[in-house]
Image: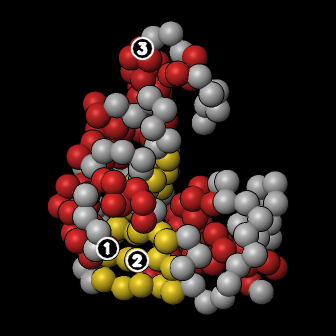
Amino acid sequence: RWDIEKPNYGIQDMTEFRNQLVQEFALAVEASPPDFVIFADYAKGLFSDECAQQFMQICQKHNVKSIVDPKQGLHKWKGCTVFKPNAKEATNLTGKCKVKDQIEDIKKATGCSLVIVTQSGQGVHIGSDEYSFIKGSKVLEVQSVIGAGDCFSAFLAMGLHYFNFESAVNLAFNAGSVYVQNRYNKPITQHELLS
């Protein structure tokens, strides 16, 4: 994570930076392959088409599952395991209005196993071999949405390690629901999640 609010994060040579990052990532994955890698694209200049594809190829080579939280571009994430846009991003990425059509377009473009389209507190659309929807169960008193997508992705990765798609998405959705009711990016406790 490189939280510097400047064009290209204030980096003079973005191409050189990308190349170095890809090389270091390849070495790290080869030395100790993780269960999942989360690629959160904030559309700030890091994930060029070529760079994203290099990351995907490294993950595929070492059988590492990847979760992509996109802002732009479908084809550059070809080969990812999970593609997780929110409702607005799914519409922008596909140009389609119906969620089922969005999921089909995303699966065709990326070849992913699972598409998850989040709709804030309303629920989550899941598209794998079948289509399902997890509906939000209550009205939330939202304090802050900053970091909610990251929270969702982190719990999703953990859940997919242990559970089937739907159970993992349900865990991630519930974690996100707890998260947005807290202030100041407060981590979720086990007690909060269970209650």
Assign a secondary structure to mark 2: strand
State the CA–CA distance, disc 1 to disc 3: 38 Å
Residue type indicated by callout 3: Glu
Quadrant location, the N terminus: top right
Mark closer to the chain start, 1 or 2: 1
Q: Position of residue 83 (x, y in %)?
A: 37, 59
Asked if disc 2 and disc 3 are in contact, CB closer than 8 Å, the reply is no
Q: Residue at x 58, y 17 (%)?
A: 10
Asked if disc 1 and disc 2 are in contact, CB closer than 8 Å, the reply is yes
Foreground mark, 2 or 3? 2
Q: Position of residue 85 (x, y in %)?
A: 42, 59
Assign a secondary structure to mark 1: helix
The residue labelled by disc 2 is 125
Q: Position of residue 8 (x, y in %)?
A: 50, 22
Mark on residue 99? 1
State the CA–CA distance, disc 1 to disc 2: 8 Å
Look at the picture and state if 55 lies above or below 99. above
